[in-house]
Each structure stands twice: as C-alpha cells, then as structure tokens.
Image (cartoon, helix red, strand yellow):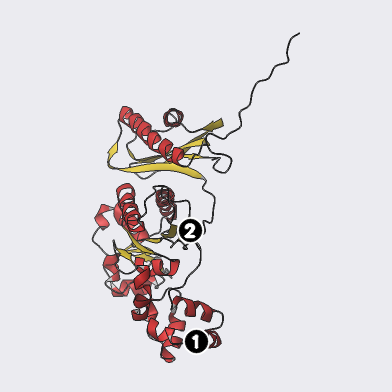
Amino acid sequence: MTEKKIRKIIHVDMDAFFASVEQRDHPEYRGKPVVVGGSPQGRGVVAAASYESRKYGIHSAMPAVQAVKRCPHAIFVKPRFDVYKDVSHQIREIFFEYTDLVEPLSLDEAYLDVTENHKNNPSATLIAREIKRDILDKTDLVASAGVSFNKFLAKIASDLDKPDGLSVIHPRKAEQFIEQLPIGKFYGVGKATLRKMESLGIRTGADLKQWEEVNLVKKFGKSGHHYYRIARAIDNRAVKSHRTRKSIGKERTFSEDVSDLEWIRQFLGELSEKIATSMQKLDAAGKTITLKVRYKNFDTVTRSYSHPQFIHSAEDISETAIRLLDETEAGTREVRLLGISVSSLNLHEGGAFGEQLELPFRKSVS
C-alpha cells in the first residue's frame, strides 16, 4: 500500500497591507501611526491600521471617530483600492512562479499548495522564505507566512510571529500545539462562539478535544463537526485555485525615478527575458502584450497590443513592449515603475509548443 503524501501548505499574509502600501509610497508616513479608511469627521470606518497605530488599540472595522480619540496624532488616509489591487496582482504573480494551486482569500492573503511546485523544491519552509524575499524585493512590502500540512494550521502559523514572521507547524507536533492553543486563537472561532465555548469550559484545544463529536454538534450545529476535526489537527480541505491563470507578468518599482529612454528599453529587454523564462517553465504562450508605466506622480498608464498568433520568445515580447513604449510619455516624464504582462494564454491548449499551425495549401497545377 502506497503511503499517502503529506501535503505542504503555505499561508501568506501581508502585514498591515493597505497601511504598509501607503507608508511605502509616502516616506513621510513611515514610522508613524497611519489609519486607512474614512474620515474621523464623518461616519468613516477604519479599513487598515499600521502597526504604529495598533499600539493605541486601533484596529480594522473600528469607527474612525473612536480611532482618532485613541490616537489624536494618527495620519488618516483615504483608501486607494486601485493601487492595492495592482500590488495584490503583483504578489499573486510571484505565487504563480512557485505553484498554480493558489487560493486567494482577499487582496492581502492566500493559501498555496506547494506539495508539487514549479521549482522542484522539497522544502515548503524554504519556498515560504523565498516568497517572502521575492515580495520584499519586488514590492518593498513585508509578508508573514505559515507552513504546515493543512490549511487550518498554516493559517494559524502565519499569525504567530507578525510582522515579518515565518512559522512552521510540523505534523508530529501538531496535536500538542493545538492542545495548548487558546480557543480564541482558533481560526473560525468568532467572538460569539468564543463566549459560548468559554461558558462551556472550553478554553484551550485540549478542552475542545475532550468533547464527543455528537455533543459538539448538539451545541454548535454543523460547525461541531469542524471543531471536532480541528481539535485533532484534521483538515482535508484542498487548496482551490478560483481562477485560471490569465496572465504572466513582471514589474518593478525603481528606487530612483528614471527618464533615460535607452536605459528603459534595455530594462524592458531584461524583463522580457524573465517573463519568457517563466512562460517556458509553464509551457505557455500568449497573444496580448501589455506595458504598464507609472510616472513619478503615480499616474499610471497601460498600452496593449494583441498578436494574431501565440508568442513566447523574449525577443517578441521585448519588441512589442518597446514599440508600445512610444505610445507613452516615458522619457519626457520620469518613470517610477515599469511592467510587462502577457495574456490571452493557451495554458490549457497544449502550451507554447502545442499550438496548431495554419498551412497555406494551394491547388496543384496539372
């Protein structure tokens, strides 16, 4: 009988995501309490709080008027969801370099199943460390990661050592870890359930483990089945990718704004090489090339061109991107970010080398 392979699951969670993006893009906010959300003068609500503002007890979903009372010198910033979505997409592209089994939970967190992965790396811990480094290098943002053999434990692990944490819960230590865990730390146990559990004397995983499944179902309905299983480190949920991969791309924010067109063209060539390498690993090809340019003042433009046939070479990608560059103001305006993506992929149609060729048959002349 073949031994069942132990899954390797990573949960990646960006640290104070919206607030960290604001601190990254506005250096004057760094090290200061930043609150992203509605105005404290109105009926605004906190969408995100930097770690500096969390020290004052500010948290998401708190009324902004209450947040300003706790920290009068906090910096309140309106959300820029278009920017957060762009960064989230950039981070997911990093995930896809390691595995196609990516299950986003929100803009700032996702599960990855790396049991089998594009890098052929047997260590999920090393992969998690590489992903954290890639995110920092490419976005200048910090992520925490949890590694374990199921989603429930990976999610808990990612929260153990924030910010910039990396925690691993090994299979042989899982049950002992859960037995010592306060019930309020269990993912999925909200405030109302926590109060009910504590009223029943359930304060730790060990307490929860004492209960028979039938009694948990009587007290908590269908959720009782879930609580019974997680008290024993059982979670068989698969990591489900919610969408087919639509594009392959890379982008980079520069430490200094650039205006030298020759340097920009050379950089686009290097970026195209990296994208072509990623496509080769996935045996992918695409038709649409999109160039993304963000100027010094954060104005962002995209220019696209769709080829009649699938392409996958660095030369084709680079040539198209450089041609699209002429449709932007790069060179006359300073640029802080450049990106290229390839979409209209044929991932499920035989890949880059499985496309059907059209042959120009002619009638034979007798």
Q: Secondary structure at mark 2?
A: strand
Tell me which corner region of the image, top left, top right, bottom left or bottom right, holds residue 168.
bottom left
Name which residue lies at 44% across and 53% down.
116
Q: Is residue 74 visible?
A: no
Location of residue 179 with respect to 364 vertically, above or below: below
| Rendering coords of residue 82 (x, y %) | 44, 52
Location of residue 20 with respect to 276 vertically, above or below: below
Within-10-Å neighbours for mark 2: few <14, some 14–19, many 20+: many
Figure quadrant of the C terminus: top right
Q: Which mark is residue 18?
A: none
| Rendering coords of residue 100 (x, y %) | 48, 51
Residue tagged by mark 1? 212
Name which residue lies at 39% across and 79% down.
184
| Rendering coords of residue 179 (x, y %) | 36, 80
Residue tagged by mark 2? 103
Q: Residue furthest left?
A: 31
Name which residue lies at 33% across and 80% down.
180
Q: Residue furthest right?
A: 366
Which amino acid lies under the numbered mark 2 shown in the image of this protein?
Answer: Glu
